[in-house]
Image: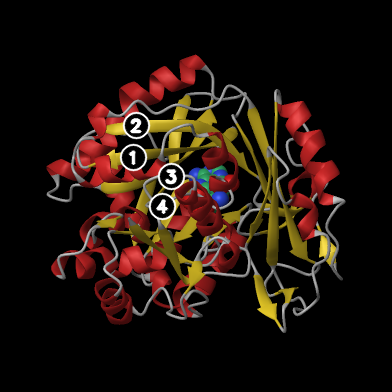
């Protein structure tokens, strides 16, 4: 079969790598892709938001299955466009992708269906938001309602900071329309865990757990980023936590979406915080995590095409998801200065040393081909993933592997998975 993957980051490289393993697949296209994806798929110069062009391409090439990796096109309704054209596509429709696209929607959904999450209020007036903050308990969390590249969340220690935050989001519109509505929510503490799942509208199958490191610097210091590294499984995701989430969170979320007339098909990513009062949902995403996918997918034993098709056909109950009994760690190699400002265009050396190296992966995030050379083309450049029997071993392997790659301004955290 012929598969089209939409997106251009490390997540899409991880998805493409899994798809390429399937004996059912003869040809993979990726729009727009990157230099690493280009080694296993044919990259097509169509942007992820160019829906009509994507649909025309899929028709022209007689694509059997399209997989949408990124949040923006999902929230924008790309799946509906493909379905209207009679094409098979993996991902939630627009009315279900709202689970990620609107934090106000997802908070209201959780409240209505008693899914554990932080207490909150939604505001579309800055004056009302500020009035609420006058007597609210600090610290407090402000969230832009819409998509903001994971950066629309402000943790405010003081009332002054929170008032300033309302101004940033709602009046200065730092994240544009995404800040027209904001969620103000209770500050929680605890370990964070990412749990990805496949969903077919009614059945949900949970993947192995993972944990991201969102801050730019060691010791969780510095600015929030798209993610500087991940490990899987999370030792904090115990059987008790799993049991609680199965009882109160996972199926409840899928049932809630179905009950609202918004059946969800695709990936639900649960961002959980393990608080003293039990696990609570921090956020939902409607796609694989990035870089969570880079540690979860290499450990998955199933043919990913079977799972995608079961989701589309509403037959996920027939699939047994299986993961290797090992661990994986992904260390992101970034450009120094990310997430604020950084240079691009430096040649990346050493990549060939990973060819045929079992248990190791280099997922490209921000790279491109320039005159036959692979050069840096983004803040997050590569994700170096290694497996090991234990997390400790996987971590040692991943850091050893980062030494094989060199480019100017290479920057990484040195403590991914360190506390384990
Ligand atoms: P989100 O995009 O909603 O996952 O938020 C980004 C990050 O902000 C999370 O990974 C948490 O580290 C932090 N965060 C979000 N909501 C809360 C909260 N209610 N309490 C504490 N930290 C939070
Ligand atoms: N790693 C967090 C995310 O994909 O949103």
What SS does tag 2 mark? strand
The Cα atoms of the two marked residues, 1 and 4, are separated by 14 Å
Tell me if the residue at label 1 has its CB under 8 Å from ligand 2. no
Q: Earlier in the sequence, mark 4 or mark 2?
A: 2
The spot of residue 326 in percent (x, y) is: 63, 25
Q: Nearer the viewer, residue 95 or 60?
A: 60
* Crowding near the residue tagged with mark 2, few <14, some 14–19, many ≥20 C-alpha atoms within 10 Å: many
Q: Residue at x 75, y 50 (%)?
A: 354
Seen from the viewer's position, the closer of residues 390 and 182 is: 390
Which type of secondary structure does the marked residue at label 3 adopt?
loop
Q: Which residue is mark 4?
A: 287
Whole-number angstrom distance, CA of label 4 to CA of label 3: 21 Å
Looking at the image, residue 334 lies above or below residue 387: below
Residue 142 appears in the rendering:
yes
Relative to residue 320, is residue 14 drawn left or right? right
Residue depicted at 25% across the width and 38% down the height: 254
106 to 246, vertically: above or below: below
Element on which disc 1 rests: helix
The image quadrant where one finds the N terminus is: bottom left
- Residue identified by numbered label 2: 205
For the residues marked 2 and 1, what is the alpha-carbon distance in whole angstroms?
10 Å
Question: Is 251 on the left-hand or right-hand side of 46?
Answer: left
Point out residue 216 in the picture as x, y percentages from the top left corner.
Answer: 73, 56
Residue sitting nearer the eye, 121 or 201: 201
Whether pointer 2 and pointer 1 mark residues with C-beta atoms closer than 8 Å, the reply is yes
Residue 127, x across and y down, in percent: 39, 70
Q: What residue sits right under mark 1 in the picture?
A: 307
Do labels 1 and 4 touch, CB within 8 Å?
Answer: no
């Amino acid at each position: 079969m012929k598969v089209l993957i939409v997106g251009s980051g490390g997540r899409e490289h991880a998805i493409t790598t899994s798809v390429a393993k399937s004996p059912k697949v003869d040809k993979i296209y990726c729009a727009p892709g990157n230099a690493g994806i280009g080694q296993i798929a044919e990259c097509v110069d169509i942007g992820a938001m160019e829906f009509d062009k994507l649909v025309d391409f899929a028709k022209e090439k007689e694509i059997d299955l399209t997989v949408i990796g990124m949040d923006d096109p999902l929230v924008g309704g790309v799946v509906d466009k493909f379905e209207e054209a009679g094409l098979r596509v993996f991902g939630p429709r627009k009315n279900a992708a709202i689970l990620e696209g609107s934090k106000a929607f997802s908070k209201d959904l959780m409240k209505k269906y008693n899914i554990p999450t932080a207490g909150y209020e939604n505001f579309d007036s800055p004056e009302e938001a500020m009035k609420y903050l006058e007597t609210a308990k600090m610290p407090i969390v402000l969230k832009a309602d819409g998509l903001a590249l994971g950066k629309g969340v402000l943790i405010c220690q003081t009332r002054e900071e929170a008032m300033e935050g309302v101004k940033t989001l709602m009046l200065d519109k730092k994240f544009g329309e995404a800040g027209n509505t904001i969620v103000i929510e209770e500050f929680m503490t605890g370990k964070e865990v990412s749990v990805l799942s496949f969903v077919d509208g009614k059945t949900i199958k949970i993947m192995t757990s993972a944990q991201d490191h969102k801050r730019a610097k060691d010791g969780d210091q510095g600015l929030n980023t798209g993610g500087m590294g991940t490990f899987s499984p999370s030792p904090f995701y115990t059987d008790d936590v799993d049991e609680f989430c199965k009882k109160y969170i996972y199926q409840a979320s899928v049932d809630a979406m179905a009950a609202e007339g918004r059946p969800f098909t695709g990936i639900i990513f649960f961002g959980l915080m393990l608080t003293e009062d039990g696990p609570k949902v921090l956020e939902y995403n409607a796609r694989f995590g990035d870089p969570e996918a880079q540690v979860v997918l290499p450990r998955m034993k199933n043919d990913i095409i079977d799972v995608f098709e079961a989701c589309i056909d509403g037959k996920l109950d027939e699939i047994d998801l299986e993961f290797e009994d090992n661990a994986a760690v992904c260390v992101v190699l970034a450009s120094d200065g990310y997430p604020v400002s950084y240079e691009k265009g430096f040649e990346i050396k050493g990549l060939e040393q990973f060819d045929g190296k079992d248990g190791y992966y280099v997922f490209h995030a921000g790279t491109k081909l320039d005159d036959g050379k692979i050069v840096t083309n983004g803040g997050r450049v590569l994700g170096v993933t290694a497996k090991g029997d234990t997390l400790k071993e996987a971590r040692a392997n991943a850091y050893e592997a980062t030494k094989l790659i060199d480019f100017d301004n290479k920057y990484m955290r040195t403590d991914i998975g360190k506390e384990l």
